[in-house]
Amino acid sequence: MDIKFVREQFPALKSGFVFMDNAGGSQILGRSVNYISDYLINSNVQLGASYKISALAGERLNKVAGQVARFVNAKDQKEIVIGPTSTMLLRILSLCVSDAWKERDEVIVTNTDHEANVSCWTDLEKKGIQIKIWKVNPENFELELSELEKLLSNRTKLVAVTHCSNVLGSINPIKKIAKIVRDAGALICVDGVAYAPHRKIDVQELDVDFYTFSWYKAYGPHLAMMYGKLELLIGMKGLNHYFFKPEDVPYKFQPGNYNFELTYGLRAIPEYLGEFYDHHFGLQNTSEEEKYKESFKRIEAYEEKLAKKLLNYLNSVKEIKIIGQTTGSGLKRVPTISFIHENFKSSEIVSQTDKANIGIRFGDFYAKKLIHDLDLEKKDGVVRVSLVHYNTAEEVEKLIQVFKEIF
């Protein structure tokens, strides 16, 4: 991977600061900033009017909706709901989809998820929905499929699960999970926030019912999206004004509409992945879908090297325990790496790296149930280093040297 080409696309990297808290929010593509500015200067009007600039604004946003739909391989761009955050979109989904549920119906959540994909479901207990928790094996940090099968029943309405833990970094076998859930007659809702910056998402291949992620953690502006199968979205109650019809998708899930200029900025992400392919492969007559796949494969291979470099060091320190997979294999994890140290609280370690102009973080990262169940609250949670493909081996080495001074 041409790291020079990659880093040139992100203006913030010129500052010299080492960004390693990317799971909390990545840096934004320069072209995304330019598109946001362009929209505000040239088409900052309300949609749906008959005058020329309003028509232009509508055309621009419709084009972006199509790009986003193709980016995740949705069948129809109406299956893409844009909103401010994944947390808000999941809350809207929980209210809408549960409207048809009855008392004693069941939802399964995990103790590895960010609360965005937990609290919105557990809050339904107030209306009589029963909640079951699929717990990670504390020895191998895996969500075991056999445990899910034990929890499923003929009253299960939905299973909420993360594609990739924002603490463990582990990639869950969503396609297998989706089949188990579907065979049980339930729906599956996947939080892909920690996965989206690192891998190609194909919602049709996964065969999931709902899938969310946040663009601001995947090189774009502070915005999120939710995919939902069209027939499900049409069949659900909406959350907009009374005069919206069932088929008014996605608008019936976007009260007050969505942010136009930030949405226009989303076009930068698929364009970047396309140019990434052209720069590295230069092959002609390649489809958009193939470009995205090959670009993410190249990114995965590069990130695996970064993860292995850091994990090799952390595994060599006997007082350190990796909270998650100890391997750097891209088949098993993304380069979001969490650990604790026998002799230090996590907060004490991070306070030292702050002085070196390296941004890492400690805490529970809203995966509160996981940190509680692993008894890590007394450590102030975990130290988390979250890398992406614009990080360099030199930056990882700098972090290692700082750790060596602390430990």
Image: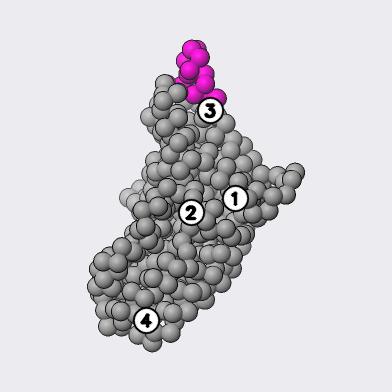
Q: Secondary structure at mark 4?
A: strand
In the image, what residue occupies the spot 39% across and 84% down?
A: 317
Depicted 313 relative to depicted 228: above or below: below
Query: Residue 45 falls in which quadrant of the image?
Result: top left
Q: Position of residue 135 (x, y in %)?
A: 43, 69
Number of labels in the image equals 4
Q: Neighbour class for label 4 at 10 Å: few (<14), some, many (≥20)?
A: some
Colour approach in the figure: one colour
Q: Earlier in the sequence, mark 4 or mark 1?
A: 1
Q: What is the C-alpha distance between the residues marked 2 and 1?
A: 12 Å
15 to 151, vertically: above or below:
above
Measured as percent of width and height from the top left, residue 210 is found at 53, 48
Q: Write down the residue under mark 2.
A: 7
The amino acid at mark 3 is Arg
Image depth: mark 1 or mark 3 in front: 1
Q: Are marks 2 and 1 in contact (CB under 8 Å)?
A: no
Residue labelled with disc 3: 60
